[in-house]
Structures are given as structure tokens and as C-alpha cells.
Amino acid sequence: MAHVARDKKKLLARVRRIAGQVNALEKALQAGTDCADVLVQIAAAKGAMHALMMEVMAGHLAEHVAAEPREARRVAEAAAVVDLLRRYSR
Amino acid sequence: MAHVARDKKKLLARVRRIAGQVNALEKALQAGTDCADVLVQIAAAKGAMHALMMEVMAGHLAEHVAAEPREARRVAEAAAVVDLLRRYSR
Amino acid sequence: MAHVARDKKKLLARVRRIAGQVNALEKALQAGTDCADVLVQIAAAKGAMHALMMEVMAGHLAEHVAAEPREARRVAEAAAVVDLLRRYSR
Amino acid sequence: MAHVARDKKKLLARVRRIAGQVNALEKALQAGTDCADVLVQIAAAKGAMHALMMEVMAGHLAEHVAAEPREARRVAEAAAVVDLLRRYSR
């Protein structure tokens, strides 16, 4: 069973918490909340999204690369992680 | 009028797009989507949050720091941005 | 006196420590050090560079934006920080 | 031959360029260069370190994880990358 399926409950709980943060952010903007507080809310939601990314990336590397018996598959899946990091991190 | 109020419509549109991305991410996990695709969705949502943060930070610096006539207020609001950057960036 | 001049000694000490880290990295590569260790050395040097950036950015915002009496100068110097963040962070 | 050894020339060239950037930064501070320019120099050197990290990480994942025949070694080396990412990225 793929790690995303095995960890589905845990990952869904994280995503729903992030959805709640984004929802609270919408309400804060509606209510005209002080922008320094809005900034902290955005940064916290971004941090939670980063933590989710690390969780799924760790699972991907463990299952689709390290535990994968076929070398050609391992090479392709490892390259997908490197490509993601190059595009989305600085 | 505070920039968050003035730009409310634009900022709300961004937050709702991010809410849509998070919602799509939940569906992808529910459907057992391939984890390399899930990773790209997460990274894209994180990127959108970062762009939103830059937008609100630019408004904060322009309005609450650069355009603020009282120096003491400027110093406090500038320090809030530096504190946020130290806590949430690497 | 500009903050960079006032904090020169402290900033130069940081830059020289980073130069030492980069020099040690060159030696590690020369010696064929294990690449997991090389990765940690690179990440540590990058972290030190980020901390230096936060230090100089805090000084820039405090002195050239918050403490600057002319609004037009404040607006230009604040925009320089936002531009830097947009180009170099994700 | 380990990728760090195989790519030694290329990696050393990158590290020496970064050393040059750090050296130029020291000179800029010595000369009292405008701090907005100093910030751009710092951000550029940090970007170069990030690119070097991606290069070595790609080599590590390709050689010590994907191409590694022993699963236990693959698991350990993949975990080292995840640990590095958790500690040094946000």
C-alpha cells in the first residue's frame, strides 16, 4: 500500500488544519484585521504547508526510492524530488 | 483606509484560490493520487501562500512604515516585519 | 553614520566566519569528504548567509526606512527590500 | 567513484566562485558600500550556496540512494536528506 494511502488519515488531518487556517485568514481579511496579524497568519499557514511537504517527501523518498527494488524506478522517483526542490525552494 | 481594506477584494480572491488548492489537495489524498503529483500540488499551494505574504508585506511596508508620519510607529511596524522574516524564513 | 558603517566590525566578523566555512567546504571537497557531511556544511554556510541577510535587512529597515525623515526616500528604500525578498525567497 | 569525487572539478569551481562572492562582500563592507547593494550581494551569494546544495543533493540521491544496491543503505542515505531538509528549509 502506498505511503500516501497508509498515512491518509494523518495527512488528511494536516490538510484540514491548513484549510482551517486559510478559512480563518479569509475571515480575518473580511473583518479588516490588523495587517501585522494577517502576515503572521499567512506565515503560519505557509509553515504548516512546508511541514506537510516534508512529511510527504520523506514518505516518497522512503517508499518510492529507498524501498523500490527496480533501480530505474528509483532513479526516476529520486529525480522527481530533486526537480521539485529546484523549482520550489531557494 | 488601510491597504488590507483597500486591497481586500484582490487579497480575498488570492486567499480563495489558495483555499481551492487546499481543497483540491484534500480530494487528491482522498482519491489516492500518485504522491509525486501530491507533492507538486503542495509545493504550488505553498508558493501561492508565499506570494500572498509578499503582497501583504509590501503593503505593510509601504503604508505602515514608509507612509507613516510618526517615527516611533514606523520603527515598531518595521520591527514586526523583521521579526516575521526571522521566524518564518531560512 | 550608516548602520553598515556603525556595525562594520560585527558584520565583517560574520562575513569572515562565512569565508572560513566556504574555505573549509573547499578543503572537504578536496579531501573527498563524505557527501552527506558536505551537504551539512553547505546548508550551515547558507544558514549563516541567511542570518547575515536578516541582520543587514533589519538595519536597512530601521535606518533607511523607519528613521528616514523624507517620505519619498522611505518609499524607495522599502521597495528595495520588497524587491529583494520577491527575487530571493520562496 | 563517489559523485563528489567525479564532480570534484565542477563543485570546486562553484565553491571558489562563492568564496569570491564572500570576498567581494567583505570588500564592500570595508568600503562602506550602500547597504541596499550589500543586501543584493548577500542574497546572490546565498542563492549560489542554495544552487550548490541542490547540485550535491541531486548527486547524493542519484548515487547513494537510487543507485545503491543495499536497501538498508538506501534508507539511511534517504533519511539523511530528509533530515537536512527539515533542519535547513522553511
Image: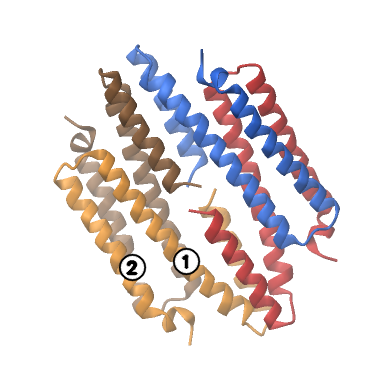
Chain colours: A blue, B red, C orange, D brown
Q: For the residue marked with disc 1, what is the amino acid?
A: Leu
Say if C9 sits above or below D67 in the image: below
* Residue drawn at 50 percent across, 36 percent down: A54
Q: Which mark is residue C15?
A: 2
* Residue drawn at 71 percent across, 43 percent down: A21
Horizontal side of C80 relative to A69 (left or right) equals right
Element type at mark 1: helix
Residue B81 in which image quadrant: bottom right
* Residue drawn at 35 percent across, 44 percent down: D53
Camera-nearest residue between B44 and B28: B28
Q: CA distance from mark 2 to mark 1?
A: 13 Å
* Residue drawn at 40 percent across, 55 percent down: C47
Q: For the residue marked with disc 2, what is the amino acid?
A: Val
Residue D31 seen in render: no
Element type at mark 2: helix
Say if C84 sits above or below C12 in the image: above
Disc 1 target residue? D39
